[in-house]
C-alpha cells in the first residue's frame, strides 16, 4: 500500500470516528423515539465502517487511527453546531451538515486507486452514507413543512 493510500484510508476512518461521535451527541439531543432509533442504527453503521477499514489496514500491517475525535477535522462545523442544538429538529439539522460532508468524502473515495477489497468496503459504506442523508433530509422536510 502506498503512503498516499494509507493517508487517504486513515482520513476516511477519522471521518467515520467523528461522525459516530457526532451521532452520540445528536442521539442525546433527540427527543423523538423513532428518529432516535434511526440515529442509533446510523451510528452503528459508522462504527462498522471504522472496524472494517481498520481491519483492512491491520491486514497490511498498517496502524489505523485511534478512536478519538479530531476536533480540528472536517466535521468541526457539525460539532460546533451540535453544542447549541436543542431537540430533534436541531439534531437532524446538525447531522445533515455532517452527512453532507461524509457523503462528499465517500463519493471522492470511490475514485481512489485502491484494491478490490478496499473498494468493496468503500462502496458499501457509501451506500450507507446515502441512506443516512436521505432519511435525515426526509425527516427535516416533513418537520419544517
Ligand atoms: Fe462511513
Ligand atoms: Fe453517515
Image (cartoon, rainbow, N blue to C red):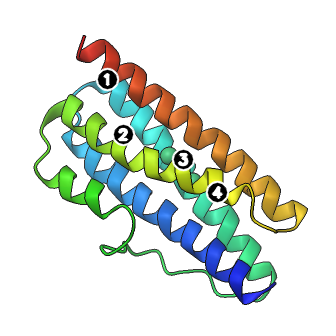
Callout 3 crowding tier (Cα within 10 Å): few <14, some 14–19, many ≥20: many
Q: State which tag comes first along the sequence, 4 or 2.
A: 2
Task: Estimate the x, y position of residue 17 in percent, counting from the top left.
Answer: 46, 65
Marks 1 and 2: CB-CB under 8 Å? yes
The image shows a total of numbered marks equal to 4
The correct choice, above or below, for 47 with respect to 8 in the image is above
In space, the residues marked 3 and 1 are separated at their CA atoms by: 18 Å
Apparent side of residue 83 relative to residue 121 in the rendered image (left or right): left
Q: Earlier in the sequence, mark 1 or mark 2?
A: 2
Is the distance from the Cβ of mark 3 to the nearest ligand 2 atom less than 8 Å?
A: yes
Q: Is residue 4 above or below residue 8?
A: below
Secondary structure under tag 1 reads helix
User: For the residue with label 2, is its CB less than 8 Å from the closest atom of ligand 2?
Assistant: no
Q: Earlier in the sequence, mark 3 or mark 1?
A: 3
Residue occupied by mark 4? 108
- State left or right for residue 37 relative to residue 53: left
* Distance from Cα at disc 3 to Cα at disc 2: 10 Å
Residue at point 30%, 73% (across, down):
71
Dot 1 corresponds to which residue?
A: 140
Q: Distance of mark 4 from mark 2, alpha carbons?
A: 18 Å
- Number of residues whose C-alpha sits closer than 10 Å to that of mark 2, classed few (under 14), some (14–19) or many (20 or more): many
- 4 or 3: tag closer to the N-terminus: 3
Residue under circle 2?
96
Which residue has dot 3 on it? 103
Give how far apart the Cα atoms at labels 4 and 1 are: 26 Å
Q: Is residue 22 above or below residue 69?
A: above
**What is the quadrant of residue 136 in the picture?**
top left
Amino acid at each position: 500500500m502506498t503512503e498516499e493510500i494509507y493517508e487517504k484510508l486513515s482520513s476516511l476512518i477519522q471521518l467515520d470516528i467523528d461522525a459516530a461521535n457526532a451521532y452520540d451527541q445528536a442521539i442525546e439531543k433527540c427527543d423523538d423515539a423513532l428518529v432516535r432509533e434511526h440515529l442509533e442504527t446510523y451510528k452503528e453503521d459508522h462504527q462498522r465502517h471504522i472496524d472494517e477499514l481498520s481491519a483492512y489496514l491491520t491486514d497490511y500491517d498498517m496502524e489505523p487511527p485511534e478512536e478519538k475525535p479530531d476536533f480540528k477535522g472536517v466535521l468541526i462545523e457539525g460539532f460546533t453546531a451540535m453544542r447549541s442544538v436543542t431537540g430533534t429538529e436541531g439534531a437532524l439539522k446538525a447531522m445533515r451538515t455532517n452527512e453532507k460532508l461524509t457523503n462528499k468524502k465517500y463519493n471522492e473515495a470511490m475514485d481512489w486507486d485502491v484494491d478490490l477489497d478496499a473498494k468493496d468496503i468503500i462502496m458499501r459504506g457509501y451506500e450507507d452514507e446515502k441512506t443516512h442523508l436521505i432519511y435525515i433530509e426526509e425527516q427535516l422536510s416533513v418537520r419544517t413543512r
